[in-house]
Image (tube, rainbow, N blue to C red):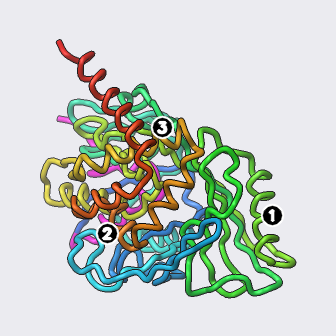
Amino acid sequence: MATFDADLIIAGAGCAGLSALWQVMQRPNEHRNVIVIDRDFEVGDDRTWAFWGTQDAPFADLADRSWARLKVRFPGWETVGQLQNKARIATSGSGQRLYHRVRQRDYEAAILREAAGHPNIRFVTQDIISLRDDPDGGVVELAEGELRAPLVLQSTQLSPSDSVARVRHPLRQHFGGWEVRTQFPIFDPHVATLMDFDTDQLSATTFFYVLPEAPNRALVELTMFSLEPRDNAFYDAQIRQHLDRLGAGDVSIDRTEYGVIPMDDRRPGQQWGQHVWNVGTVGGMTKPTSGYTFQRIHSQSRHLISHWADGTTPSPVPQPPGRYRFADRTLLNILHHHPEHGRTIFERLYASTSIDDVLTFLDEDSTLGKDARMVAKLPWVPFVRAAVAEFGADLATAITRRP
């Protein structure tokens, strides 16, 4: 009979690992032993997470800012959308949908503070060398030995099968952002800018993203979809030019953030093996064409921890209808091979569809009829070409797999 070090091991204490830990702590009378492993547990402050949902959405209570109005902007025009009530949509809950911002420092501090009061939770500060799925449990190899548990949730590395999977569209969403104070009041604190495409596209799909706090304070971020990220000085120069164009005057920088999110056509599997499960980005929870991950992470962790708490065999989070995955791959194909079409596609999308309906589509919770009407108004030539290419790739894969 196997000897275990804990009933559950959480390998990696980023957003996904801490989400799983939070779900454990929400279970009443849960006293089984949990080990959380990471190289350090210092509360960070180098990122923010933005998501849409009602006030009862997971971690919406930690949001330091929320907006009911969102703006998109293109050369020559812009539109502002009021977010609506979404009582019928399960993923959005009921009541007023808002766009929330949660800071990494608040998220991590709240969860780690709560965990300090649970004697059944132990933190191990070590680098994770490797993971293994044995017949009787999951194994985490550390520099100082191994730890075992019947269930391991890991967010640190792709599973062996995913790491060798072919990637046809190796795009990245990369970004650099400044939290600024400006000399002149150039922001509307009641309206967050989801996408501002009124800028040079820089041989990619490029836009600015603005989360305002006051008329002279905001997070201003340059976001690009392309194959390779740039160095920090590049983002800094573009942000400075953008603020100059807006008439910001003198600018002071309170904080910076930089990052890269995979946006490729490989959707990683949720299961490494029978006892090891992949969570977060390495578990396929990042939306390939937008980078949004936060709410998906919490849905997955709630699903897996519910199984663990009930003593039932875990199962993957149910997948949305296949049309969403095919649409993601088709758009990735265009942005990879023809980035010059990127701004035009988004412009046509927002010119013909409300921002609220676009968010519902990104939730993969829309109706087939609405999805069809939305897609029908997009530039059809690049989409038809990309869709044919993706269909052909699927057909070729199916043929090669025949016995």
2 or 3: mark nearer the eye = 2
Give the answer, above or below, for where 399 lies relative to 46: above
Residue 357's tag is: none
Left or right position of 208 against 60: right
Is residue 338 placed above or below 281 in the rendered structure? above
Going by the numbered disc 3, the residue's amino acid type is: Leu
Q: Which amino acid type is marked by label 1?
A: Gln
**Label 2 SS:** helix
- Sequence-first tag of 2 and 3: 2
**Which residue is label 3 attached to?**
142
Closer-to-camera residue (5/367): 367
Q: Earlier in the sequence, mark 1 or mark 2?
A: 2
Circle 3 Cα neighbour tier, 10 Å, few/some/many (<14 / 14–19 / ≥20):
some
Tell me where residue 69 appears, x and y as whole percent.
Answer: 49, 82
Q: Which of the two discs, 1 and 3, sits closer to the camera?
A: 1
Residue 224, horizontal then vertical, whole percent: 61, 52
Residue at image mark 1? 241
Which of the labelled discs sits on residue 25, or is there none? 2
Type of amino acid at the residue the image marks with label 2? Met
Q: Secondary structure at mark 3?
A: strand
Q: CA separation, marks 1 and 2?
A: 46 Å
Q: Is residue 147 rendered magenta in the image?
A: no
Q: Which image quadrant for residue 230?
A: top right
Assess disc 1: are there few (<14), some (14-19) or many (≥20) residues with their C-alpha within 10 Å of its C-alpha: few
Q: CA distance from mark 1 to mark 3?
A: 46 Å
Q: Which residues are magenta?
A: 1-29
Residue drawn at the location 21% of the way across and 52% of the way down: 318
